[in-house]
Amino acid sequence: MAKAELKILIGLHRAVNYIDRQSAKIFTEYKLSMGQFAVLEALYHKGDATVGEIQERILSSSGTMPLIINNLEKRGYLIRETDRKDKRRCILHITPQGEELICEVYPKNEAKIFEIMSYWTEAEKDQLVTLLKKFGDEINGEKS
């Protein structure tokens, strides 16, 4: 019998992979990758940002970020402008076309996530949030 820690890790991976597969089905309908959706969603909800800030917001260390941004720019979903304060950086802005797209895709993805998580009661969801926050705080050196 596997130790509880390994069962937890496997369970978390399976849950996240399942949710990602369901989300990917939605994104594919709009010819978006997971990374493209994440960039547009971050810009829409958090506002203009540098490439580095976007990577941090979407928890990406991916070397594919330039490709993702280039493809979104080619499709007219975002524009980049040189940062006036630091010419080495560029600021990403979502376009009206990008906003229109994310306003269509985001609610569908959110509804799918809510549907998937409807298997838990509200108390179970609250408990899971508490446990994951406690774990996150511990591994990040913060005490709850």
Image (cartoon, rainbow, N blue to C red):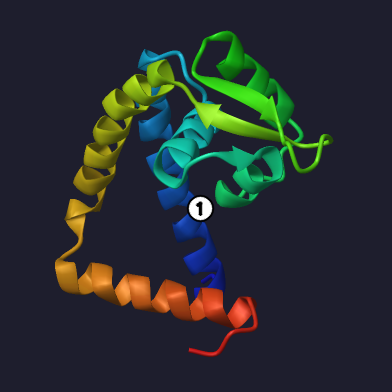
Q: Nearer the viewer, residue 141 or 91?
A: 91
Q: Secondary structure at mark 1?
A: helix
Indicate whether 41 appears above or below 132.
above
Which residue occupies the extreme front position in the image?
84
Tell me how many marks there are.
1
Instruction: Measuring from the top left, give residue 133's x and y in whole percent.
Output: 45, 75
Is residue 68 visible in the rendered image? The answer is no
Quadrant of residue 60 in the image?
Answer: top right
Is residue 135 visible in the rendered image? The answer is yes
Q: What residue appears at the point 56 percent right and 50 percent down from the top-left corner?
A: 57
Image-based side of 28 in relation to 108, left or right:
right
Q: Which residue is mark 1?
A: 13
Near mark 1 (Cα within 10 A), the count class, few <14, some 14-19 or many ≥20, is few
Image-based side of 141 in relation to 25, left or right:
right
Q: What residue appears at the point 46 percent right and 46 percent down from the top-left corner?
A: 46
Indicate whether 137 appears above or below 113.
below
Instruction: Measuring from the top left, give residue 30's x and y in whole percent.
Output: 39, 15
Amino acid type at circle 1 is His
Q: What residue appears at the point 48 percent right and 42 percent down from the top-left corner?
A: 47
Instruction: Measuring from the top left, give residue 92's x and y in whole percent.
Output: 60, 32
Instruction: Measuring from the top left, give residue 91's x and y in whole percent.
Output: 65, 35
Which residue occupies the extreme bottom position in the image?
143
